[in-house]
Image (spheres, rainbow, N blue to C red):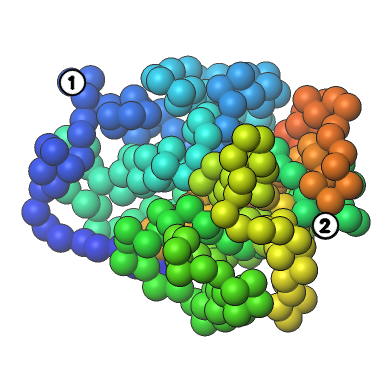
Amino acid sequence: MIPKTRYHSNPLEPSELIVTEQGAIYHLNLRPHEIAETILVVGDQNRVERVSRHFDTIEHKIENREFVTHTGRIGKCELTVMSTGIGCDNIDIVVNELDALANIDLESRLINKDPKSLNIIRLGTSGALQEDIPVDSFVVSTHGLGFDGLLNFYETTPSDQELAIQNAFVQQTGWSDDLNPIYVAKGSSKLIEQIGEGMTPGITATAHGFYGPQGRSLRMSPKINELNQKLRQFEYLGHRVTNFEMETSALYGLSGSLGHQACTVCAIIANRFKKEYSKDYKSTVDLLIQNVLEKLTNKQGSVEKNV
């Protein structure tokens, strides 16, 4: 997405920007000094500690609802790790409130004239949609393919490439008008290059549910027949759909539109084509965490700051 933000000189109304009596943003319960410019997001609250145990120091620990946040350092690199819970609806809260912490004065409620860009890196779990992507490997998301519909509630400006992939997908799959209009959002080339080295790159399909929206059937039949087969067969100029999860399209779409850098890397804990599931996915997630932290803190010292 091409950045498309607004600036005006009027304070935001209390109903639109909700700030607690302690001066914290409402859902995340965070104040601006309690986050780093590089933020790792995970779905599971228990996974926050699995990341922060690698920190040399932890300066802040904040918890509110499903949002658990630890901010600390590895060497000279300041990092935040935060749980988002599951789904694009939570990503909407997280990205908008992180952006507010970075780019809005919570006391005056005024938008900063010079916006700051955050690095937001999702460490997730996912199911592979291609036979050649083994369980317990890692995938880096070049794009998010959104079935969730979230970005349709915002004025956004897709790039030519995003629109081309979107149109090709609709044409190749015969996407029904009865379903949410899809969208495509590209990740940060800088972060994908730095963090995705040695991982399988591809488009990550993002669903707004775990069962029917991902082609699973228990006691209800999914509306789209052979959804995963259609995803598996899609190809456009070398781009293919590698995996299925529930957050990346919203993360990429909102971050790109707000001028932040975003990247998703996922541990593959299942292969939907082979019907295989990891025998020890927690160990695979731990390896992913170590892989990413090493690249963030050892390669060129740390992630470059954004202005």
Q: Is residue 303 left or right of residue 274?
A: left
The percent coordinates of residue 120 (x first, y second) are 53, 46
Label disc, if present, on residue 130 of the rendered structure: 2
**Disc 1, SS:** loop
What residue sits 39% from the left and 73% below the top?
Answer: 157
Q: Residues within 10 Å of mark 1 (few under 14, many from 20)?
A: few
Where residue 156 sits, quadrant-wise, is bottom left
Where residue 73 sits, quadrant-wise, is top right
Above-or-below relation of 79 to 197: above
Q: Is residue 126 left or right of residue 110?
A: right
What residue sits 70% from the left and 38% below the top?
Answer: 125
Above-or-below relation of 173 to 227: below
Question: Disc 2 marks which amino acid?
Answer: Gln
Label disc, if present, on residue 197 of the rendered structure: none
Give the residue at mark 1.
21
Asked whether 144 or 7 is in front, the reply is: 144
Q: Is residue 11 left or right of residue 2?
A: left
Q: Earlier in the sequence, mark 1 or mark 2?
A: 1
Question: Disc 1 marks which amino acid?
Answer: Glu
Where residue 169 sits, quadrant-wise, is bottom right
Image quadrant for the C terminus? bottom left
The percent coordinates of residue 254 (x first, y second) are 43, 55
Residue 202 visible in the current orientation = no
The percent coordinates of residue 3 (x first, y second) are 40, 67
What residue sits 20% from the left and 40% below the top?
Answer: 17
The percent coordinates of residue 224 (x first, y second) are 61, 58
Q: Is residue 221 left or right of residue 273?
A: left
Asked whether 270 or 229 is in front, the reply is: 229
CA gap between label 1 and label 2 equals 50 Å
**Disc 2, SS:** loop
Q: Residues within 10 Å of mark 2 (few under 14, many from 20)?
A: many
Q: Nearer the viewer, mark 1 or mark 2?
A: 2
